[in-house]
Amino acid sequence: MDIKDIEKLALLARIELSEEEKQKMVKEMDSILVFIDQIQKADVNITEREAGEVRNIMREDGEPHESGIYTEDILKEAPKTRGDYVEVKKIL
């Protein structure tokens, strides 16, 4: 990577760089590209045994209790009700 590449990147990023910053960016980008090259050369062939099996275990859906069994108790405890509903302040 050279100064012209850095100038093009700076133009695309809409930033201004001094000559000193451009020189520094050339060195930094070169080291970044070397690191990326090392990563690309890494062996990433992982066997299924190494990776492990990923599963999402979910509970069975079911009725935890009979529908409406606590409705009266909840309505008695609510500060404000309207019919069979708990009334709350409008938020939005």
Image: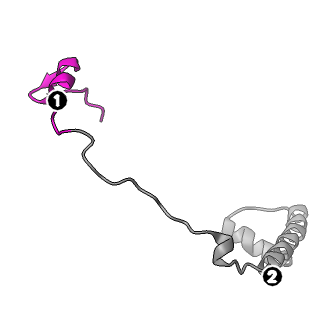
Q: Tell me the amino acid under the disc marked 2.
A: Lys
The magenta span reads 66-92
Q: Quadrant of residue 8?
A: bottom right
Where residue 19 appears, as percent x and y from the top left, is 88, 65
**Which residue is denoted by mark 2 in the rendering?**
41
Q: Quadrant of residue 92?
A: top left
Residue that carries the numbered disc 1 in the rendered image = 71
Q: Quadrant of the N terminus?
A: bottom right
- Residue 39, how many percent across, how many down? 79, 75
Foreground residue among 55 and 43: 55
At horizontal 86% and vertical 62% (from top left) the residue drawn is 21
Q: Position of residue 10 (x, y in %)?
A: 74, 68
**Residue 79 inside the magenta-drawn segment:** yes
Residue that appears at 76% across and 62% down: 16
- Identify the element where label 1 is drawn: helix
Question: Could you classify mark 2 by the number of other residues whose Cα lies within 10 Å: few (under 14), some (14-19), or many (20 or more)?
Answer: few
